[in-house]
Image: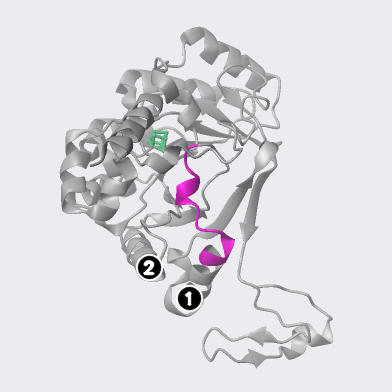
Amino acid sequence: MNTELAARLAEVERRYPVKVNEYCGALAERSAAVAKLYLPDPRELEEAGLSSDGLAEQAQSPVPKLIRRYVDRAVVLTTTECFVRCRFCFRKRLWADGAACFHLSSDELSAICSFLDGHHEVTDILLSGGDPLVLGDDRLLEIARKIRAAGGVETIRICSRAPAVQPERITEHLVSELAKIDGLWFVTHFDHPEELTPEAERACRLLVASGIPVLNQTVLLAGVNDDADTLRRLFKRLAALRVKPHYLFHIDPIEGVSHFATGIAKGLEILNEFRATLSSIATPAFAIDLPEGGGKVILAPDCRREDGAYRSSVYGTYIRHPLVDRNNGDASC
Ligand code: SF4
């Protein structure tokens, strides 16, 4: 390695510290794609005019550690700690420059519950971070139970990379206690089929067997998983495990991650291939998150021609639908 590259890598590591646990380190040695999730890249210093908080999470935080962008949903930042540090993380600002980790305090939890008591229209809470599963069982369960009991909350989503990066954290005790919380969902985050090791699959099976609905979110990452075959393998296997591929996200407009951006055309091209080759139970929604807190936009390949014919996922030709025509319908696929 030349000295200039070494200096740039040292600067990347100073700005965004590397953290890889033993499990992911071993996995990264076996998988070049997985290694790219955790190894620093000099391009992380290319900021291209992007903000560290490009989704305006701080501006959309009515009380500390709660982000509210939509009427009915909000995110609670339970901690800034993680089992690993992913190079594509959209909350890099929380751990950049060696920032000290925080866990949600009891006072902050009380303030969030008070806010929810005053805003019954917020019914769906995402417990996020960082990774909520770095918290001990008792604290995680306390947070989940208190938030579930607050205001008009009906559903809670625990968003965690633990099944992918620290699968032994998914224990029978934790899962059986989480399953007792009415309306609780679990959201895993797998980006590549090589993350689905026997240990990771055991963790997914344990969650599913408990009755907790399990969704997965994936980030479309240039050079890691931006081809249909790789993602098809990932999504098929997740569906077989009864983990529903929920979202495929384009990378967010955040500084330090732009080298992972694929562009929208690539995502739509992959989704287009899936129309004929991947069941709907295995196909996620493709989404971008807009800057300035503008929220998610779901994108789909355009299957409707100007003359009102639709592209067949079986033949690739355009076919008219008589009842749609008769009613001047404008359904898109
Ligand atoms: S586990 Fe999640 S929050 Fe933590 S570094 Fe990875 S993407 Fe970011």
**Which image quadrant: the C terminus?**
bottom right
Q: Residue at x 53, y 38 (%)?
A: 47
Range of the magenta residues?
256-266
Q: Residue at x 16, y 52 (%)?
A: 30
Amino acid found under the numbered disc labelled 1: Glu
In the rendered view, does 93 fall on the left or right side of 331? Answer: left
Instruction: Give percent across and percent down for residue 160.
Output: 38, 37
**Which image quadrant: the N terminus?**
top left
**Sequence order check, earlier mark of 1 and 2:** 2
Label ID, residue 108: none
Q: Which residue is mark 2?
A: 232
Q: Callout 2: 10 Å neighbours few (<14), some, many (20+)?
A: many
- On screen, residue 264 above or below 16: below
125 is within the stretch colored magenta: no
Q: Residue at x 45, y 50 (%)?
A: 260
Q: Point out the quarter of the image occupied by ligand 1.
A: top left
Is the residue marked 2 within 8 Å of ligand 1, measured from its CB? no
Q: Which residue is mark 1?
A: 273
Amino acid found under the numbered disc labelled 2: Arg
Q: Nearer the viewer, residue 91 or 261?
A: 261
Instruction: Give percent across and percent down for residue 210.
Output: 32, 44
In the rendered view, does 52 fall on the left or right side of 214? Answer: right
Is the residue marked 1 within 8 Å of ligand 1, measured from its CB? no
Cβ–Cβ under 8 Å for marks 1 and 2: yes
Q: Could you tell me which secondary element the residue under label 2 belongs to? A: helix
- On screen, residue 61 above or below 33: above
Instruction: Give percent across and percent down for residue 263.
Output: 55, 59
257 is within the stretch colored magenta: yes
